[in-house]
Amino acid sequence: MSIIARSIFFTLLNVVFMTSNANAATTSLVDDSATVVLDGTPAMAWRLVPPKNRDNTIVGRSRVNIRLATAPWVGKTGKIYMLLPPESASSVKIKWRSQGRLLEGQLGPGGRTLVYAGAIRDPRLEDVFDINVEADGSKISNVQRLRFYFEIDVD
């Protein structure tokens, strides 16, 4: 490859690289400090009483008013994700149903699930989640809190 051709190739490569970086989404934490658990800590119970056939699953339910402060992104388009840190109990699975403003889904430790995609029009995005929690009762020895949080990728 000639010096001129190599120079043109690297110039084009740099332009492509800069363009792809300019289009990359920016990820930010979403303030969810106004979120409220509506019915307190869920009471966990054995799915089967007594546990049979090695099914040590414990289940619980909770209702949570999700309140996301989206004011910094009003007028922009983005995707909001719910996350559960990997250090959460390894056997925990949560599933939720929403009232329709946010997406329904499920999540495990270390997971990231889409709950909203589109234009951010309001300074607060709010919905109520009916959350079902499942965990392996043989692996949980004490009270543990689910410390989920939210991130936004802005286009």
Image (cartoon, rainbow, N blue to C red):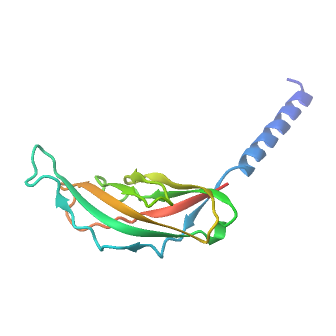
- Residue lying furthest front: 99
Q: Which of 91 and 11 is in front in this view?
A: 91
Query: Which residue sits at x=35%, y=73%?
Result: 38
Q: Is residue 150 visible?
A: yes
Q: Report the number of numbered marks.
A: 0
Quarter of the image where one finds residue 69: bottom right
Q: Which of 136 and 104 is in front in this view?
A: 104
Q: Visible in this render: residue 139?
A: no
User: Is 62 positioned to the left or the right of 129 in the image?
Assistant: left
- At x 44%, y 61%, the residue is 99
Q: Where is residue 89 in the image (x, y as percent from the top left)?
A: 30, 58
Q: What x and y, as percent, mark residue 126?
A: 50, 68
Instruction: Give the position of the N terminus as an image quadrant.
Output: top right
Image height of 43 relative to 15, above or below: below
Q: Give coordinates of residue 128: x percent, y percent.
A: 42, 66
Residue 58: x, y in percent? 20, 56
Quarter holding the C terminus? Answer: bottom right
Q: Relative to 11, is 143 on the left or the right?
A: left
Look at 9% across and 55% down and name the residue there.
Answer: 49
Residue at 39% in and 53% down = 107
Q: Quadrant of residue 70?
A: bottom right
